[in-house]
Image: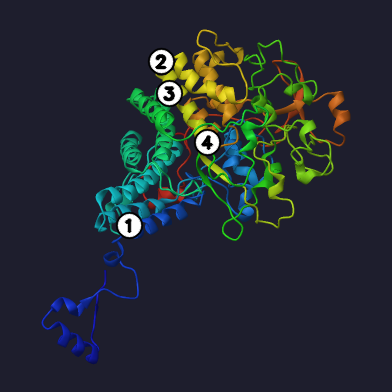
Amino acid sequence: MKKYRILAGFLFATAFLVSGCNDEFLERYPLDRITNQTFWNTENDLRVYNNSLYDLARNDDNVPILHGHYNGFESNWGSVWFQDEFADNMAPTNARHLFFQQVRSGKHTVPTDPQQFGYKGWNFVRAINVGLANYDKANVAQAIKDRYIAEARLFRGWFYAEKVQKFGDVPFVDKELNVDSPELYAARTPREEAMTKVLEDLNFAATKLPDSWNDGNAPGRLNRWCALLVKSRLCLYEGTWRKYHGGTNATLWLEEAASAAKELMDKGPYRLYNTGNPKTDYNAYHRVLNLAGNPEVLYWRKYQLGVFTNHVQSYFEYAGGATKSMVEDYLCTDGLPISLSPLYKGDAKIEDVFENRDPRLRQTVLHPEDAAFYKYHLADGRPYPRIQGMEGGYLSTTGYHIIKHYNADDMIGKAFDTAESPAIILRFGEALLNYAEAQAELGKITQADLDLSINKLRDRVAMPHLTIGKVPVDPRYTADGVSPLIAEIRRERRIELFMEGFRYNDLKRWKQGKKLLTPTLGIRWDAAAIARYPKANVKTAVDPASGNTYIDVYQGTDWASPVFDENKHYLWPIPLNTLAQNPAIKQNPGW
């Protein structure tokens, strides 16, 4: 850093008289600014620096790892809740959700500049690497330094793993660069080499972060338990990707995923939120403003008036609604899928859909009788569902309004962008799902494993246990190329984690992109529906499996005939400007 000489005569003379022949006195660092030479001294310095990393990570578009909700108008698309629109869980048609529709249908193209949640955010890595080059300068115990090093490395590993999931090979950089650094013009680091470095970062974080920062989950900082959950998530992705797409050491990654999840399950202080009410416990804690002290939530993003707010509740309509495919995946109360259960009442009218079904369905999709309970659309008193084309109220593209996160009290009487709905980023329920899936993919899952994981989730909603030897064989999933047990664990994941941002990545890592070819249908549409939903403006299609007619959301649009190229669409394209700036970077296959 630049040093300044004290040249003023009076000051020089005074200094000379005081310091004699001490030449070092003539060179002093500036007293009116923070510099690299003066900053890295105390634990507070390290804490303050890492606070800046959290601040950078709040930009979910650039750094989509601690994904919450954007503030202001961008709440309409920047929320983690809307990430399922990339897949087959939700059916948006709003023009502001165009990119979700393009990806869902395989109609996205090579962008000139990075797309939403895309090939960007590299300033975040630079900030991390600057910190990693300087933390050891602090005059504190190594164990204290390691906490902040671990925090930064968790961020770096998580960031790069997310980029690998979207783009494959990545430009992995683990040191601070300058304008002359050759790495700026290097080729991307091969996927497996980059992920080896990611695992090193995750392992360091999972051992060096403190069990608690004593912040009371207010929320505060990522602790060791968070690192274990992140590690289980990222290792599960990589292990299943290598198993189904090809790659080395898939078993190692699955074992790492299972081990991390199990350590959290066995030793961590977290548990499922459960008051003993299966009719409300699944979605109750998703619909409150303050999650401090919640036993299931490891990490969440807090919004507070005057500090950081959002407007996400007002954009539920933009999500379109849950799809017929999603709704049909909920089991009946006998533990059987609708294709096998005698309890299934069919879908002649929407009320029938909820009869004898997993209670999570009614806590995810609006039952017509629950509109008053949820104060739906600010308690407007209208009958629901309401279909596009009808007058007034919230309108749905499918008829299946989503209420899992709905909180009218965060809108009533509030001005634009003053809402405070939090975002759950890491919760214990995911660890149970990660563990069960990893063990199943390794071929060594036991009934005890299921009872520690999947069946705890089912207990919360009073559903029958998943039992080895009695696993139902759903004919809808026999073509997926996996065992009925793995198919059921995947189903459980889809149900439990709906609208939490997992479905698209899950389909990619399982190599199940073909599911994105499924037509996006809604509720049953017949003479009774036409009479019940006056002025609704819908297109319809016949479901070949049942012969019944349903709302066909995208008929007549550019997204009516989705495509999925197995050699192309599992990765996103590299932007044209990136390729032009660095010829060593090559485009992904098929793009």
Kind of residue at badge 4: Glu
**Residue at 58% from the left image edge and 22% from the top image edge:** 459
Mark linked to residue 438: 3
Residue 168, position as x, y percentages in the image: 40, 36
Kind of residue at badge 3: Ala
Secondary structure type for disc 3: helix
Q: Is residue 338 left or right of residue 30?
A: right
Q: Earlier in the sequence, mark 3 or mark 4?
A: 4
- Measured Cα–Cα span from mark 2 to mark 3: 9 Å
Q: Earlier in the sequence, mark 1 or mark 4?
A: 1
Seen from the viewer's position, the closer of residues 111 and 299 is 299
Instruction: Provide the residue designation for mark 4.
Output: 296
Asked if 134 appears above or below 154 in the picture, the reply is below
Q: Is residue 562 left or right of residue 44?
A: right
Asked if disc 1 and disc 4 are in contact, CB closer than 8 Å, the reply is no
Instruction: Provide the residue designation for mark 2.
Output: 443
Residue 185, position as x, y percentages in the image: 32, 50
Mark linked to residue 43: 1
Q: Quadrant of residue 424?
A: top right
Kind of residue at badge 1: Glu
Asked if 220 appears above or below 370 in the picture, the reply is below
Local crowd at mark 4 within 10 Å, few (<14), some, or many (≥20)? many
- Measured Cα–Cα span from mark 3 to mark 1: 38 Å
Q: Earlier in the sequence, mark 4 or mark 2?
A: 4
Residue 432, position as x, y percentages in the image: 48, 27
Kind of residue at badge 2: Gly
- Measured Cα–Cα span from mark 2 to mark 1: 46 Å
Secondary structure type for disc 4: loop
Secondary structure type for disc 1: helix
